[in-house]
Amino acid sequence: MSGVESSLAVMFAMGALAMSALGAVVLAWAAQRRTAALERRAATLEATNEQLQDQVWELRESEERYRSLIEGQDDLILRRDGFGRLTYVNEAFAAMADRPRETLLGTTYAIPAVETQHREPRQDGSLSYDQAIEAGPGLRWVSWIQTPVRNARGETEIQAVGRDVTDRRRAEGALAEARARAEAGSEAKSRFLATVSHEIRTPLNGVLGMADLLMGTRIDAEQTTYVQAVKTSGQALLSIIDEILDFSKIEAGKLELSYEPFDLTALVEGTVELLAPRAQGKGVEIASYIGATVPRRLMGDAARMRQVLTNLAGNAVKFTDAGGIGLRVTAAPGGMVRFEIADTGVGIPADRIGRIFEEFEQADGSASSRHGGTGLGLAISRRLVAGMGGELTVASTPGEGSTFAFALPFKAVSDGSQPMTQAVLDGRSVLVVSRSPYEAPFLARRLSDAGATARTIGDPLRAQEILEAERPGVLIVDGAIGEDDARTLAAAAKANGVTTRIVLLSPFERRAFGPPGAAGFDAYLVKPVREHSLAARLSPQAEASPERAEAMPQDGRPQAPQALSVLLAEDNEINALLATRLLQRNGATVTLARNGIEAVARFQACVDGEIPDFDLVLMDVRMPGLDGHEAVRRIREIEAAHGRTRLRIVALTANAFEEDRRLAIASGMDDTLAKPIDEAGLVAALGGTMTAARVA
């Protein structure tokens, strides 16, 4: 081997040793890195293990809290798997089942149910129902809620939570029983009131009717006073009965409101005219005004509206000794119609305003009160107004008067009727001389609404100066200013060329005033002044007649059609005598039937041609043997069998309930006439018979 070769061999040997050493270093470095990585991983695993142990501990603690919370509940809690086996029950369920909890798990046990009610599925998939179960403590009611849930393995189970509602069910049962007893008591009270109403109204019909008949005979002034006292007392008793009956119907929720077209002007003016004699007898006025923008035909219950207005205005008359009472009707926002009844009476003390609408309360509740009454009128009125969609309120100042007001949502009925037209009064100048608090202002507003220029003056001397200076076209003088002043003003008006001179007179003033023409007037109007009467007096056509006045009946009695043949079915002798005399006084001939059987026999005799036909049947509802309803049914059957024209039959009833009227109509009656019978109602029945005959 040469030297070169030896050197190369040494160099290769040394390279190999170097490479071997480098490999050892690399291996050592790699081992060190693996060791460090393992140590880091071990540390990470140890930290993760500690976190997991903490979470497990927290979960166990949460589970224990949840378990203790569940076990502490009084509610029954259980879970069932898809096969209906119990997978969990709490102690409350085990106690209700009266079994150890361990023996229940894995079974399909259910506490025996006596009754299950009200299974009601919910939107979330749960189900609720009440169940009566035979448990260890006895019969219990449980209200269950079932909900689908998932267990730890992701399987669907049904969880049921039940609450013991036995006490609630017992309370509900007691309440239902009490309600049933109350309803039965209310029904019994209604029947009692209907019976008492009939039994009281029947003799009261005789008392009032005979008083009316006696008033029409030749009796002296002293006897007239006594008879009038009897009639007034009877009417007061009737009013009390009506109020008690109305209140009992409202309290029982049996009051029904009709929905029919009615004439607002006739309703308002009729109410005022009804109360005018009582007000004028006390020396106070009563007047009404309906705004020009208020519809004259409305849909609603006219009878109940009249009752409310009569109650409120009647109270105003009762508590007003000077001044007057005004009933104002105006349009209110939202299509409402507002009613205001104002007076200049004693007013209501501030401490009683909040109580006057309560039952049996009065504005003057002292033992020395001189006004009387049941204290039901305002309570009834408030409930009627509320039933029609309004609220009755009051504003009052003691010593100055009160104003009761309410607004109702009436629907207008268009029939072309209008208040006073501007074509009649447009441009006319009217001077009204009056000190009245309501009639004069209302009169001026009516005239202004109709296009006139109206001015109201309370001082006669000042009015005379205006007549001389301005010479208005129309002079209207209130007779209450005194006859001398009225005559003076009439003369001054005539001297200054006033062509229309009208005096306002109440019936009391009319008798004392004498002929209006002799006092210098060419016409008079009766107070309270009616809208159409005012328009008629001021129309151009009215100026042609020298003395124009409203027709005033001589004896106050309505006039009836003549020569009607009436079959009267009435078992009460006094009421039969009364109705017979009233019918005869109005020109009818009367055939009396003492009961329903006799009434049917009389009608059959007409059909057989044995006696002349009747124009009208007045049928008492309650009669022995055969009542009025069944008698009418038999009469209608006879009519149908023989093809006869329907005979008009009007029920005579002492029952004042609306359901009694509906029952009468359903049995075949054409109308009803309530007892006590008044002559106006009887004449209206006769008039309806004539109208029906003309139509037929």
Image (cartoon, grey):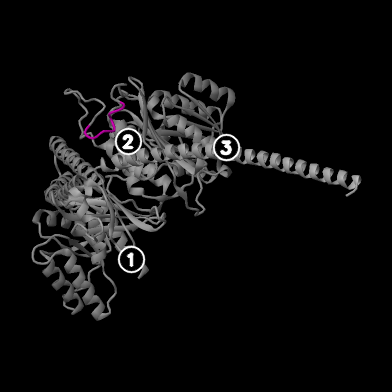
Residue 524 appears in the picture as rendered: no
Res 65 quadrant in image: top left
Q: Label 2 neighbourhood size at 10 Å, few (<14), some (14-19), many (20+)? A: many
Instruction: Read off the magenta span.
Output: 353-360
Query: Is label 2 or label 3 in front?
Result: 3
Q: Secondary structure at mark 2?
A: helix
The x and y percentages for residue 643 are 28, 79
Of the two numbered discs 2 and 1 on the same chain, state the one appearing first in sequence. Answer: 2
Mark sitting on residue 40: 3
356 inside magenta stretch? yes
Q: Mark on residue 3? A: none
Residue pointed to by mark 2: 312
Q: Name the spot of residue 455 as percent of width and height, x first.
A: 53, 28
What is the number of callouts on the image?
3
Label at residue 692 = 1
What amino acid does circle 1 point to?
A: Ala
Query: Dot 1, crowdedness within 10 Å: few (<14), some or many (≥20)?
Result: some
User: Viewer-nearest of labels 2 and 1?
Assistant: 2
